[in-house]
Amino acid sequence: MAPTVPTIDADTCVGCGSCTSVCPAGVIEVSAKKAVVVHPERCISCGHCAAACPAGAISLFDTTPQRLVKLGETAADDFRHLVETRRTVRSFLPDTLSEEYLTELLDVTQHCPSAVNFRPVEYTVLGRAFMHQLGLKIGEAFPSDHPYSFMIKGQGKDGADPLFHGAPHFVLVHAANKGYDPAEDTILAATTLELYAVAKGLGTFWGGLVTMCLEMFPNLKAECGIPDDHKVHCCIAVGKTDTAKEKYRRVVPRVPYPVKYVN
Ligand SMILES: Cc1cc2nc3c(=O)[nH]c(=O)nc-3n(C[C@H](O)[C@H](O)[C@H](O)COP(=O)(O)O)c2cc1C
Ligand code: SF4
Ligand code: SF4
């Protein structure tokens, strides 16, 4: 099943605008109290619009999302619920979390699997003031002819924050370029950290744009205090979700990954 652009049932739509406010790509507009897909070419098929729609008016992948199910009794049901209901959050409250709280959050990842238990993962947690300055420097240095320049060159202009989305904390997950499978170990740690944060009721997103920029600009990586011989493999933003702006009510079916059994 190929990724698709959402379809909106105009009769069901109540014109609330929830879909437009959560869409990361400006695909949908509300006109005459009805949501309309105006930029289908920009759609990344994330399904945030369908997950946020209170009326169930939006379909994706030829399916209509269901209401969230109640928590099950078993750990497996709880885990599936956690995985199904985790969504990228891009609206945060400014409240900061204490270092003690963040340390406990990161501590869970000591239980992650690691290739031959090499355990190369290290964290650097950026705060708002540092992020603000870093964002301006990235926006300044970013090449104008890059496909993402339309987003990143606007960083800091009129309050735009495409790199950090106002998150109060930004965790750089890095490891030395040596030893066994540092990329896999960092991704496992970041995934576990994210799910634990979501289980605690926090909002998160993967900051792939910043990961890319720190690779492009080694001087800015150094300013973050990351050693030369380390690579930042992934970044996770963490904070309290601004639920007045972003709330997901539905589980949206995705394209399942193909499975082959070889016996
Ligand atoms: C490796 C990776 C990098 C990402 N980088 C960004 C990013 O820089 N900015 C952003 O807003 N979202 C980023 N995302 C979020 C994706 O757009 C999002 O996961 C996808 O649209 C599916 O939505 P979901 O996370 O709610 O399931 C990233 C996701 C991943 C896995
Ligand atoms: S979220 Fe649903 S009801 Fe609200 S404007 Fe969008 S399609 Fe219409
Ligand atoms: S699927 Fe994602 S990118 Fe496409 S219209 Fe919906 S929210 Fe926007």
Image (tube, helix red, strand yellow):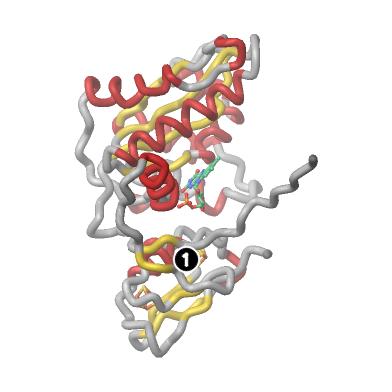
Please state, as top left, top right, bottom left or bottom right, where the N terminus lies in the image.
Answer: bottom right
Q: In this view, does 212 lie above or below 23?
A: above
The quadrant where residue 224 appears: top left
Q: Mark 1 points at which residue?
A: 26
Residue at horizontal 42 percent and vertical 17 percent from the top = 110
Q: How many numbered marks have been drawn onto this rendered protein structure?
A: 1
On screen, residue 100 versus residue 144, left or right, reads left
Ligand 3: does it lie within 8 Å of the C-beta at label 1?
yes
* Residue 63 image offset from top left, x and y in percent: 53, 72
* Residue 6 image offset from top left, x and y in percent: 53, 72
Residue at horizontal 53 percent and vertical 20 percent from the top = 113
Q: In this view, does 103 lie above or below 161?
A: above
Label 1 packing within 10 angstroms: few (<14), some (14-19), many (20+): some
Please state, as top left, top right, bottom left or bottom right, where the C terminus lies in the image.
Answer: top right
Q: As rendered, which of 238 and 131 lies closer to the eye?
A: 238
* Residue 170 image offset from top left, x and y in percent: 38, 32
* Residue 255 image offset from top left, x and y in percent: 60, 59
Residue at horizontal 63 percent and vertical 14 percent from the top = 177
Circle 1: residue type: Gly
On screen, residue 124 versus residue 60, left or right, reads left
Regarding mark 1 in the picture, which secondary structure is present there?
Answer: loop
Q: As rendered, which of 260 and 9 lies closer to the eye?
A: 260
Residue at horizontal 57 percent and vertical 64 percent from the top = 42
On screen, residue 15 versus residue 153, left or right, reads left
On screen, residue 138 versus residue 74, left or right, reads right
Of all residues, the one furthest to the right in this rendering is 263
